Each structure stands twice: as C-alpha cells, then as structure tokens.
Amino acid sequence: MAVADAPGLRPTSDRVRETLFNWLQPGLAGARVLDLFAGSGALGLEALSRGAREAVLVERDPQLAETLRAAVGRLQAEGQAQVVRADALDWLGAPMSGRFDLVFLDPPFASNPWPELLRLLPPWLAAGARLYVEASLAATVPLGPEWLPQREGGTREVRYALYRHAPRAGTPAATLAPEPNADGAATE
C-alpha cells in the first residue's frame, strides 16, 4: 500500500507489524478494531485482512483521511472499515459508537497525548480488550493497574507492547517506560 507523505507520519515498520500480528492472530477473528492516530491505516487495514470483523480508523489530517478512504475503496472494504476524520482525543470525548476488542495507539512521537488518551479510552473497551502501544524510546506511557502486559518488543527507534484490559483493584500499574542506558539513566 502506498503511504502518503505527511509531517510526523511514521508508519509501523514491516518487521514490527509482522511481530504484532503474530501476537494477535489467535484472537483476531471477529474482533472490532479501533485504529486511533491511523496515519497510513496499515494496522487497522491489516487487522481486517487477518479476520477482524470491523475497523474504525481515526485520522485528523484531511489528506491522510482521504488517502485512507481511497485505500478502503481499493480494498473493497467499505462495509468493514470506517474512516473518521477527527482528532483522536476529541473523538474519544464524543458520544460512544460501540466498544472495541482491540485498540491500536501509535500517536505522533512529538505529541504527548498519553494521560488524556488513557483517561478517555476505558468506556470504549469491550471486556478483555487488548491495547497495542507504540512509542518513542524516551516516552513514558502511564498505563494504569487495569492494563496487564502481554508482550513487549523494541527496535532502535521504538518500543511497542501489547496489553490486556482487566480492571481490578490492587493490581500494580503497568508503565511503558524509557529503557535505561548502560549507566542506568533513561535514554532520550
């Protein structure tokens, strides 16, 4: 799939995407997927191609949203994929349009939407929902105790992890935190 050129657009690498979908494959069939900060739409559209029932792709950039709509048309996935041109945080703050089994969160690295994003997300989640997080090496993603780590990985540029939503009291908080360097200090 051709990727549009837009400031801050950084599609998930093929290697990371392959790893992610190997992790997801056993539970992907019939899933309802939310791809916030959709960008190229690679994650949401690949989820559909691997058996997800429905994908909602939220992208605020008008050119990228139009490119996503064209890709959905080429794939003849209009009945399964919905492209929403909106800011992800604004969209999460609007009235709900259903709950999701899997959410992809890969915001632009220059932004820091994590606290607000993680506050707004829970009502949108189905029971046992999974959350994929991709962040820069220097970012700290303050996931709460309701997020149980499932798998983690990284490259020279990004850290990525898969979590399962399991709200319950007394569970230690999960945090995707910067990796320490050889001196024990966090990397930038």
Image: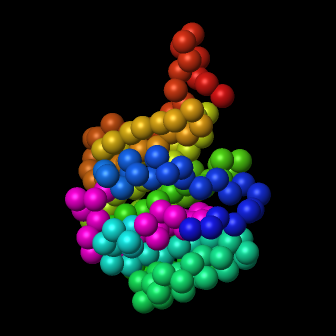
Image quadrant occupied by the N terminus: bottom right
Please indicate, yes or no, whether residue 67 appears anywhere in the rendered image: yes
- Seen from this angle, which residue lies furthest left? 26
**What is the magenta range?**
24-46
The residue positioned 39% from the left and 39% from the top of the image is 152
The residue positioned 53% from the left and 21% from the top of the image is 180
In the depicted view, which residue is nearer to us: 121 or 153? 153
Residue 25 % position (x, y): 28, 59
The residue positioned 33% from the left and 37% from the top of the image is 172
- Seen from this angle, which residue lies furthest right? 7
Residue 125 % position (x, y): 37, 67
Left or right: 18, with 88 as reference point: left
Residue 50 vs 188, above or below: the answer is: below
| Colouring of the image | rainbow
Which image quadrant for residue 151?
top left
Please indicate, yes or no, whether residue 90 appears anywhere in the rendered image: no
Image quadrant occupied by the C terminus: top right
In the depicted view, which residue is nearer to us: 67 or 27? 67
